[in-house]
Image: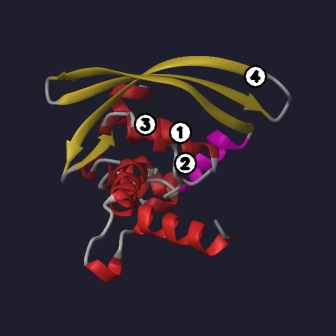
Amino acid sequence: MNIFSLYKKFRVFFLGNWSKGKVCILPVLILCVMVIFIVPGCRNYDEKFDVVYFFKTEPEKAVLDFFQSLNNKDPDFIYTNLLPDKDKNNISREKYSEELYKILSGVEKIEVTRTVYLGYENEMSKVVAEFEISYKNGEAEQYKKYIYLTEENGNWKIIFEKTFI
């Protein structure tokens, strides 16, 4: 058996025998599986693939995007995608960004260790997030916070007044 015959058998097995009109379904199946699993596993915040993100509910994904944008000190993403419209009417983008930068000025890193979806009740969802904040002075603290969300125009928004006040 020479290399050419091995190549031919390999090609026929994986790609099918094009000359006889028979096509193997394996490449098509592999492509479909990749699309099904990879696309939903991309984070909304930065469009990067994240295996953990794939297995989360939509409210949990919004919470993960929130913490990722906090970690990257990106108040524009939060204002645009996670702040309900009624809250946007009460504060300008510039004022919101300024306040968030002040809050995050001493923070080095925010890392989410766990999220759990607790359910939907009274037109809002509840997610518990466990996370660690590392400060610029070298200290680190762990937190557990209940995040309340509402669905607005098909997107999950964080109810900041209930979550943080």
Q: Which residue is mark 3?
A: 63
In the image, 1 versus 60, the foreground residue is: 1
SS at mark 4? strand
* Distance Cα–Cα, label 4 vs label 3: 21 Å
Q: Which residue is mark 4?
A: 140
Q: Is residue 103 magenta?
A: yes
- Along the polypeptide, which appears first: circle 4 or circle 3? 3
Residue 131 point in image, percent of width and height: 58, 24
Q: Which residue is mark 1?
A: 67
In the rendered image, the residue lying farthest to the front is 1
Is mark 4 in CB contact (under 8 Å) with mark 1? no
Residue sitting at 59 percent across and 66 percent down?
A: 6
| Mark 4 burial class by Cα count in 10 Å: few <14, some 14-19, many 20+ | some
Span highlighted in magenta in the image: 97-105
Is mark 1 in CB contact (under 8 Å) with mark 3? yes
* Distance Cα–Cα, label 2 vs label 4: 19 Å
Residue 106 point in image, percent of width and height: 75, 38
Going by the image, does 108 lie left or right of 150? right
Could you tell me the amino acid type at mark 4? Answer: Ala
Residue sitting at 41 percent across and 68 percent down?
A: 15
| Mark 3 burial class by Cα count in 10 Å: few <14, some 14-19, many 20+ | many
Residue 69 marker: 2
| Mark 1 burial class by Cα count in 10 Å: few <14, some 14-19, many 20+ | many
